[in-house]
Image: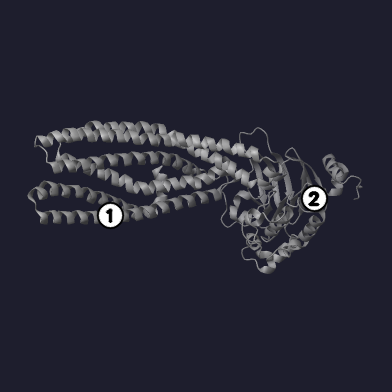
Amino acid sequence: MLKKLWPYARPYRAYILLGVVCSAAEAVFELLIPMVMSRIVNVGIPAGDTAFILRQGLKMVAMAVISLLFGVGGAALSATAGMGFGANLRRAEYERLQSYAFSNIEKFSTASLVTRMTSDCNTMQMTLMMGMRLLVRSPVMLIAALFFSIRISARLSSVFLVSLPLLAAAVSVILVHASPLFRALQENTDALNLVVQEDLTGIRVVKSFVQEEREQEKFSQRNHALKSASQRSFGMVVINMPIMMLIVYSTMIAVLWFGGQMVSAHTLETGDLMVYFTYIMQIMISLMMVSMMFMMMTRSVACAHRIIEVLDEQPAIGDDHAVNGAAVADGSIDFSHVSFRYHAENPEWVLEDIELHIASGETVGILGGTGSGKTSLVSLIPRLYEATEGTVRVGGRPVAEYTMEHLRQAVSMVLQKNTLFSGTIRENLLWGDPEATEEDLLAACRAACADEFLDRLPGGLDYDLGQGGVNVSGGQKQRLCIARAILKKPKVLILDDSTSAVDTATDAKIRAAFAGALKDTTKLIIAQRVTSVMDADRILVMDGGRIVDQGTHRELLSRCAIYQEIYHAQQEGVSIDG
């Protein structure tokens, strides 16, 4: 685990090294102060030597100031290293997520991924920050204080032969039980975040179905589960403290008892006993700090496992077979005996033995019932998913021979669920072409019929859409997404039911604009309405993951039962010539 996480801390190794040195030096100078104090008690006070007492006092002040400076330096260095380490982890996770295929993302819930990038990374950076301080300072204090204690009285130090094993045993038992509890705590955090995310994303659905109470109950259940997991896990931390204090105070009583007898027998100086008490406190406080750090590290181990799961997840689709410099020549598409299923263990095929050729520049409509495989078919073209069997070609080459960047730059896809990002309309459109001019943006909006409402929005292209485009209608959002896709000037344009929220007249205008603006682009149009595809060069009819028929509107209307059923259900009373 350390080997996998160290590269993200390596840029701060100088800070870590200097921070460790500062923490160790702070502890050493702090431990020297009681030794000087013992000389004041044993030598200066009995002799009444004021000058000696002042000199030793000034030494103590100087040591305290030096210890303070090292402490401040160590804190600053540990904060810099910890925050940098956390930032590197978050960036690495985010970059890894960007390389994931849809199947990889589906393995983790979105809420879990958010928790792993925020809460888990915060825990790791706090562990490094606290570890640089406490895991250095406390052992140094412990070892040095033990050394000085034995120097003062080896006989009295035999008390530690009982207390230290007891402390070690108590901490070990607590750690063994705490580890699975912290893992469960993070999983319950994921579950709570999932409810919150779903409710905020689907707030309109919740309110339209009047399900606020149901969602509140679901939230309460997850919240209660998180509270219970927190109580169980942090209960172990709470138990740790009284056990530590019991052993500490028992040790102090034993030292007071035996040390008092040694002072009475004149085998131990009073000043030495005072210093010994100081070192006893330092030893016990150090042990408590070490035990607390181990508790924190137990939670960190759970978080680290979750982070490493994300970093170790191999993208299901990559550029391993890409040919250097391969570019998409044209928009031709070929499916050669393609079959597909989302998971290898699924017995049912989503697509089965698809054989299809689409010429460059052709407009192809795709119709079929829900679950017929329409979206799955077009998702294989830009490699959002990988074909399980067979080969998909674009521009005459298998899609695996292109880098993801080159392939997806040549293929624009407007998904069934339209997504706009927070920011202005201009900023969203520039996703299609960062170098697009004002005229390019307006031309794309005209082609997508977005200009019809753009003039009515305050600021036009600079109108702020808010989070997810919440302040525009579904139809307006669809048209802006189409305009964004057009700006890419793609070789292939895929519209996945992306005009469902616009009226038939606007739908017709958009298709007419495509004929001029995207003359050489291959256009695949998935639609529920026959009118959206009836003017296409060819229409594919899908059912049960297969292409059951293909042809023009007139040809399919004369021979395909599924197409006839869809057509007559939507266009009742219209003749074949219509």
Place of residue 292 in the rendered image (x, y in percent of width and height, measured from the top left): 35, 40
User: Residue 43: percent from the left, percent from the top?
Assistant: 10, 48
Which residue in the protein does label 1 denote?
Answer: 68
Q: Residue at x 24, y 30 (%)?
A: 162
- 286 versus 44 height, above or below: above
Splitting the image into 4 quarters, where does residue 406 fall? Answer: bottom right
Q: Position of residue 346 (x, y in %)?
A: 64, 34
Q: Locate the N terminus and report the quarter of the image it occupies.
A: top left
Q: Position of residue 405 (x, y in %)?
A: 59, 55
Q: Identity of the amino acid at label 1?
A: Leu
Residue in the picture at 34% in, 33% down: 172
Which of disc 1 and disc 2 is earlier in sequence? 1
Q: Which element carries disc 2, helix, strand or loop?
A: strand
State the residue in front, 86 or 185.
Answer: 185
Identify the residue at image location x=65%, y=50%. 382
Labelled disc at residue 419: none
Judge from the rendering whether residue 78 lies leftward or rightward of residue 24; answer left or right: right
Instruction: Give how far apart the Cα atoms at labels 2 and 1 are.
Output: 80 Å
Residue type highlighted by circle 2: Arg
Mark 2 residue crowding within 10 angstroms, few (<14) / some (14–19) / many (20+): many
Residue at point 14% right, 38% down?
153
Q: Is residue 472 visible?
A: yes
Left or right of 153: which side holds 98? right
Residue where numbered disc 2 is placed: 538
428 or 65, nearer to the observer: 65
